[in-house]
Image (tube, helix red, strand yellow):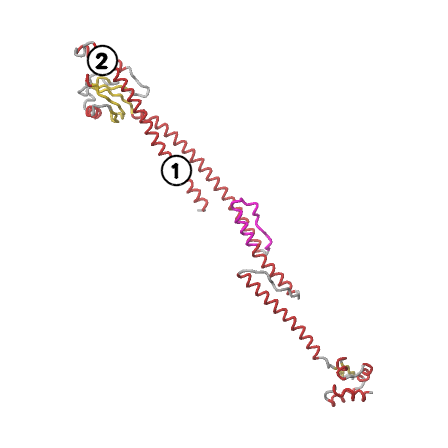
């Protein structure tokens, strides 16, 4: 797996974790706020119901009829009839239980039904007569209810809300948040993929430049340079570094080639005075030693030529077949023979025999000259 792929994957995972964490925090906070709001709202509705019951009871008390069972029952029936009309589009309803747990008001049960008397919900309500809320099972359905005790009539008045309906706004909000998170993840993934693709294209471009430089070096062309301006500015220093490497390598190589060319053509170049480092300095020192050796060889060649010329100063040539004798001009000078007498000496073989008998002729040059005359 390429490094850029791993980076993109890590970025995507990090983004997903960050969005998931943010979504969880938002969901938790929003759920708490919504439930608090709903509890307050449903509590207000229960308070309004209790207010109506208390109002009816207060009327009986004002008229002194609160002790008359017939009037009390009539008032209770009137209240229950009014409460039965309270219906909510979300499925909420009012539940009224007497002291024995019989249902005085229920959407489906008849008045006085004992179907709820021993239910967990009725037991929990009777166990906690003060105002409160709870989540429980009621007639096989999960519900949330707010309840309060109306002591004068020993009623437990409940405002019942199906749990699914109560949590529906929270679920709707969570769905929206999830959709928003999915869009954010998709957008982040697309941006990450586009960035990774762009970086991949730049890296491929840099690799193409490096291959071009490598091929040029393999072909012996050190003048080729990478196209640094054509590379993204963030990655441009890579190609510029390759170019700098080529420059640092080309200069000593060019000097080496120039020196070798000069020497091969018989010319002696000047010693290299530029400063190099490392292996390049080793090459420079070797070239300078080579230049010094060639210079000394040239000097010795000149000295050898001069020595050869001096060695052949007294050369003479005698062609036996023809009898011709020729001596070098330097030989005549050593013998002290004038120019006008040279021809006569060359035509006289006897002179050679006399010269041999004399041994070293140079000190006797005047005597020989008188004989040749």
Front-most of 147 and 131?
Answer: 131
Q: In the rendered structure, which disc, 1 or 2, sits on the residue that comes first in sequence?
A: 1
Q: Residue furthest bottom?
A: 357
Q: Which residue is mark 2?
A: 58
Q: Is residue 101 magenta?
A: no
> Across the whole image, how many numbered discs are drawn on residues?
2
Q: Quadrant of the C terminus?
A: bottom right
Residue occupying the point 35% across, 31% down: 27
Residue 355 percent coordinates (x, y): 75, 88
Question: Vertical placement of 40 versus 320: above or below?
Answer: above
Q: Secondary structure at mark 2?
A: helix
Q: Is residue 371 left or right of residue 292?
A: right
Q: Is residue 230 magenta?
A: yes
Residue 78 percent coordinates (x, y): 24, 12
Q: Which image quadrant is residue 281 in? A: bottom right
Residue 67 percent coordinates (x, y): 16, 12
What segment carries the magenta color?
221-246
Q: Is residue 159 visible?
A: yes
Q: Which residue is mark 1?
A: 18
Front-most of 220 and 131?
Answer: 131
Question: Vertical placement of 357 versus 281: above or below?
Answer: below
Front-most of 50 and 169?
Answer: 50
Mark 1–mark 2 distance (CA, rounded to whole Å): 59 Å
């Amino acid at each position: 797996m390429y490094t850029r792929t791993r980076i993109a994957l890590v970025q995507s995972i990090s983004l997903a974790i960050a969005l998931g964490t943010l979504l969880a925090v938002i969901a938790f906070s929003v759920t708490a706020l919504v439930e608090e709001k709903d509890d307050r709202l449903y509590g207000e509705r229960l308070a309004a119901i209790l207010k109506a019951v208390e109002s009816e009871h207060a009327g009986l008390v004002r008229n002194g009829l609160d002790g008359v069972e017939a009037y009390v029952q009539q008032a209770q029936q009137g209240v229950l009839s009014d409460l039965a009309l309270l219906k909510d589009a979300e499925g909420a309803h009012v539940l009224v239980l007497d002291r024995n747990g019989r249902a005085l008001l229920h959407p489906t049960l008849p008045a006085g039904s004992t179907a709820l008397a021993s239910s967990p919900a009725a037991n929990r309500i009777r166990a906690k007569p003060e105002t409160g809320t709870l989540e429980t099972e009621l007639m096989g359905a999960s519900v949330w209810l707010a309840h309060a005790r109306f002591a004068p009539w020993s009623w437990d008045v409940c405002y019942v809300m199906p749990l699914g309906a109560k949590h529906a706004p929270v679920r709707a909000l969570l769905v929206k948040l999830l959709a928003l998170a999915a869009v954010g993840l998709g957008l982040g993934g697309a941006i990450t993929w586009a960035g990774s693709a762009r970086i991949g294209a730049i890296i491929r471009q840099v690799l193409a430049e490096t291959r071009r430089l490598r091929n040029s070096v393999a072909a012996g062309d050190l003048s080729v340079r990478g196209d640094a301006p054509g590379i993204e500015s963030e990655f441009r220093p890579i190609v510029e570094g390759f170019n700098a490497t080529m420059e640092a390598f080309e200069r000593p190589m060019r000097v080496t080639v120039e020196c070798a060319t000069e020497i091969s053509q018989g010319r002696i170049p000047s010693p290299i005075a530029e400063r190099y480092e490392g292996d390049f300095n080793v090459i420079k020192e070797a070239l300078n030693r080579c230049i010094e050796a060639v210079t000394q060889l040239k000097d010795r060649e000149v000295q050898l030529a001069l020595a050869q010329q001096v060695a052949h100063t007294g050369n003479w040539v005698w062609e036996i077949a023809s009898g011709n004798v020729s001596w070098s001009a330097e030989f005549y000078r050593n013998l002290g023979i004038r120019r006008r007498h040279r021809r006569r000496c060359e035509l006289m073989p006897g002179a050679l025999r006399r010269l041999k008998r004399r041994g070293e002729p140079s000190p006797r040059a005047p005597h020989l000259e008188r004989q040749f005359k």
